[in-house]
Image (cartoon, helix red, strand yellow):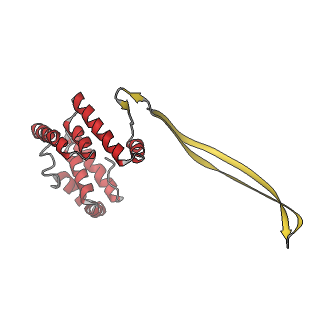
Amino acid sequence: MRGNAGVRWLSTKLASTGNNIANGTVTGQTVTSSSYSFWLPRFSLVVEPADSGYRFRHALVREAVLGRMPPHDTARAHREVAERLAELGAPPVRVAHHYLAAGLPSRAVPFVLRAVETAKRNGSWEALNDVDAMPDGLIAALATDERARLHFEGFAPSTRRMILYWIKSAQRAETRARRIAETVRLAADNRPPRL
């Protein structure tokens, strides 16, 4: 898929000549003119065929295309994608997602169970068990900035969880410290980090 985005300058001048009419009689001519100009956003997109149909790299494009499809066609498309992904050995969670979107939960169950088994094996099944517990470094950093602490506590619970997971998932202590510092800096302005 290829595309580009940009802006284009649009400038137009208009002139219109017409008759003045009073009591059904033409009393003369009027000339009116105006002009307008502005920047016009421009976006072009090329969707190219892929081995398995068409591929959309951006979710907004994909959703725009799917949003115009009738529900029965969307369900059929999700079912076909799930079947193809299963044939290709794609991660079971992706296959399950498409079967569920197709309205076929019974076909999704085996893939969901395989995804759970995989998550238990690689540790991601328990990765969020203690996500709500604040790391010591974040507690200490927020204690030094009252405004950041108040804003952080005011974030939606889901936003706090994402931030806490992002901090805790750091592999190195330096990365964790950098993420804590960024969280506090942005929270002082009532902004969560862009994850």
The extreme front residue here reads 72
Is the residue 99 above or below the residue 47 in the image?
A: below
The image quadrant of residue 76 is: top left
The extreme top residue here reads 51
The residue lying toward the viewer, choosing from 71 and 163, is 71
x and y percent of residue 91 in the render?
21, 34
* Residue at image location 31% in from the left, 44% down from the top: 75
x and y percent of residue 131 in the render?
17, 52
| 20 left or right of 40 in image | right
x and y percent of residue 40 in the render?
59, 47
The residue lying toward the viewer, choosing from 32 and 190, is 32
Is the residue 99 above or below the residue 151 in the image?
A: above
* Residue at image location 21% in from the left, 40% down from the top: 93
| 120 left or right of 73 in image | left
| 50 left or right of 123 in image | right
Q: Specify the quadrant that holds the N terminus.
A: top left
Q: How many marks?
A: 0
The residue lying toward the viewer, choosing from 188 and 163, is 163
The extreme bottom residue here reads 23
The residue lying toward the viewer, choosing from 3 and 94, is 94
x and y percent of residue 14 in the render?
75, 52
